[in-house]
């Protein structure tokens, strides 16, 4: 097998494994809380996260470092060029989800829970899921 093909298949397999792991973690977290999984909440999580990022980035009370990273994240999400193109099923959005999780973890730790709770536009279940996925709770 050619070397470039091994590298491509390894990267694709790793990202796919990470995506499946994130979905399983979300499912386990919901199950441990004794709550029924509402797929509408899971589907709504991404738009809520985008609104949270925009609100945190434009809030002058949030420290400058997380605001800068959040603006960079917004630019990355808006620009059509991605690490993995979005037209590739599952994997195209997995890279976005990973980058969002990393930046949000940084933002949650540096902006503080009060700012996160103040700007969260979604449900309490969605906020708990976000905090669990970013390692904040």
Image (tube, rainbow, N blue to C red):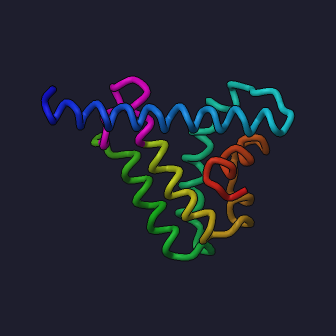
**Residue 61 horizontal/vertical position (percent):** 63, 74
- Closer to the camera in the image, 108 or 50: 108
* Quadrant in the rendering for residue 38: top right
Image vertical order of residue 56 relative to residue 3, above or below: below
Q: Main secondary structure of the magenta part?
A: loop
Residue 128 inside the magenta-drawn segment:
no
Residue 69 left/right relative to 1: right
- Closer to the camera in the image, 67 or 8: 8
- Closer to the camera in the image, 10 or 71: 10
Image vertical order of residue 75 relative to residue 82, above or below: below
Residue at 57% across, 59% down = 105
Residue closest to the far front: 1
Residue 89 inside the magenta-drawn segment:
yes
Residue at 50% across, 55% down = 102
Residue at 74% across, 66% down = 114
Residue closest to the far left: 2
* Quadrant in the rendering for residue 2: top left
Residue at 59% across, 46% down = 49
**Residue 100 horizontal/vertical position (percent):** 49, 50
If the image is split into quadrants, where does the C terminus sit? bottom right
**Residue 128 horizontal/vertical position (percent):** 74, 47
* Quadrant in the rendering for residue 56: bottom right
Q: How many marks?
A: 0
Residue closest to the far right: 34
If the image is split into quadrants, where does the N terminus sit? top left
**Residue 88 horizontal/vertical position (percent):** 34, 26
Residue 7 left/right relative to 17: left
Image vertical order of residue 90 relative to residue 30, above or below: above
Find the magenta span and give its range. Answer: 82-95
């Amino acid at each position: 097998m050619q070397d470039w093909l091994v590298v491509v298949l390894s990267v694709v397999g790793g990202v796919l494994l990470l995506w499946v792991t994130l979905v399983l973690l979300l499912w386990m977290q919901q199950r441990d809380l004794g709550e029924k999984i509402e797929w509408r909440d899971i589907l709504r999580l991404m738009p809520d996260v985008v609104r949270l990022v925009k609100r945190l980035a434009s809030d002058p009370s949030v420290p400058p470092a997380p605001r800068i990273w959040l603006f960079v994240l917004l630019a990355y999400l808006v620009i059509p060029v991605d690490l993995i193109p979005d037209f590739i099923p599952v994997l195209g959005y997995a890279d976005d989800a990973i980058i969002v999780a990393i930046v949000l973890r940084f933002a949650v730790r540096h902006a503080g829970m009060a700012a996160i709770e103040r700007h969260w536009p979604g449900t309490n279940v969605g906020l708990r899921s976000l905090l669990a996925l970013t390692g904040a709770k």
